[in-house]
Image: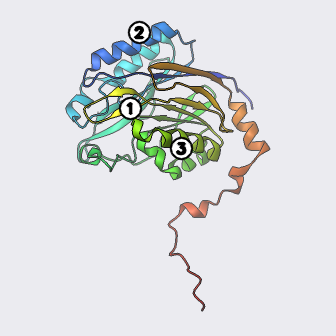
């Protein structure tokens, strides 16, 4: 694979302080100083990392989180993925979003969570995203996604077919369903023959206890790093040739049926003509 080289990826698992953006940003900056990621590393933070996951749209969208990320990425010479609340013109006026800031201070395309969590009031406060987003980190084509998106595998198949070889899932995933989180992250890696980096938070808010268990997973489903349930930094060196070699050796994606991503006709129940 021409131009391929390993990239060091990190996941920062911590407990955001509810609605305290400055303090949470300071926590991340201290974690970066303590970790000293090599230049060119890819650092991934949890969903709404600096406000915590919240239905208080004013708190989630206050300040300029992407601007902060751009400055920090440039200062540490890293690629930095954040989760944040974003004001938009369509109803109800905001989205749950993520973006990657790059070492030159440039921001990539913003991805907006396509599946607001309908089990809660999230859809009343945050509009669903409308498009898949890809970004580039060194030799990796990244497909960023957010939390509840993980339950919808068709999104990840579209990403793999569009060229993604690294999928990120940033989350505020509760302890109550943490076994689902682990199982689905591994499944998304295996079925799409891609690296998966899942970064969850820990701690609690007034309604939920969060389970952590951030993972870095290979295209073969191997767990390369596992945070457990406490604040932690996970890391792994990942090589895009692992993805390309596995997709060549075991070319399951070539047997994909693109017609099955179209609307499925009514099922036939074996009634005799």
Which residue is more in the foreground, 103 or 267?
A: 267
* Element class at badge 1: strand
Q: Are marks 2 and 3 in contact (CB under 8 Å)?
A: no
**Residue 86, quarter of the rendered image:** top left
Comes first in the chain, label 2 or label 3: 2
Residue 50 position, x and y percent, is 32, 23
In this view, the residue farthest toward the front is: 176
Q: Quadrant of the C terminus?
A: bottom right
Picture residue at 70% right of the left edge, 56% below the top: 255
Which residue does the numbered mark 2 point to in the structure image?
30
Q: Are marks 1 and 2 in contact (CB under 8 Å)?
A: no
Q: Are marks 1 and 3 in contact (CB under 8 Å)?
A: no
Q: Is residue 251 visible?
A: yes
Which residue does the numbered mark 3 point to in the structure image?
184
The answer to whether residue 256 is left or right of residue 214 is: right
Picture residue at 66% right of the left edge, 56% below the top: 256
Which circle, 2 or 3, is nearer the viewer? Answer: 3
């Amino acid at each position: 694979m021409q131009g391929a080289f390993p990239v060091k990826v990190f996941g920062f698992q911590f407990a955001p302080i509810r609605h305290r953006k400055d303090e949470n940003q300071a926590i991340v900056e201290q974690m970066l100083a303590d970790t000293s990621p090599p230049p060119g590393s890819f650092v991934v933070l949890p969903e709404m990392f600096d406000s915590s996951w919240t239905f208080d749209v004013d708190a989630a969208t206050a300040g300029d989180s992407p601007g902060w990320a751009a400055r920090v990425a440039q200062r540490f010479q890293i690629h930095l993925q954040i989760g944040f609340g974003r004001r938009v013109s369509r109803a109800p006026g905001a989205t749950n979003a993520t973006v990657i800031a790059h070492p030159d201070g440039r921001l990539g395309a913003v991805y907006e969570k396509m599946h607001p969590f309908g089990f809660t009031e999230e859809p009343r406060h945050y509009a669903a995203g409308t498009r898949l987003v890809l970004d580039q980190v060194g030799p990796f084509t990244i497909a960023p996604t957010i939390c509840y998106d993980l339950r919808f595998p068709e999104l990840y198949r579209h990403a793999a077919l569009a060229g993604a070889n690294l999928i990120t899932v940033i989350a505020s995933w509760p302890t109550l369903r943490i076994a689902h989180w682990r199982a689905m992250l591994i499944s998304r890696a295996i079925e799409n023959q891609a690296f998966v980096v899942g970064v969850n938070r820990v701690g609690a808010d007034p309604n939920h206890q969060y389970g952590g268990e951030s993972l870095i997973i290979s295209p073969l489903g191997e767990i390369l790093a596992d945070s457990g349930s406490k604040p932690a930094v996970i890391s792994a060196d990942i090589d895009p040739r692992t993805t390309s070699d596995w997709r060549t050796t075991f070319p399951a994606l070539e047997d994909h049926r693109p017609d099955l991503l179209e609307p499925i006709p009514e099922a036939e129940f074996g009634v005799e003509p």
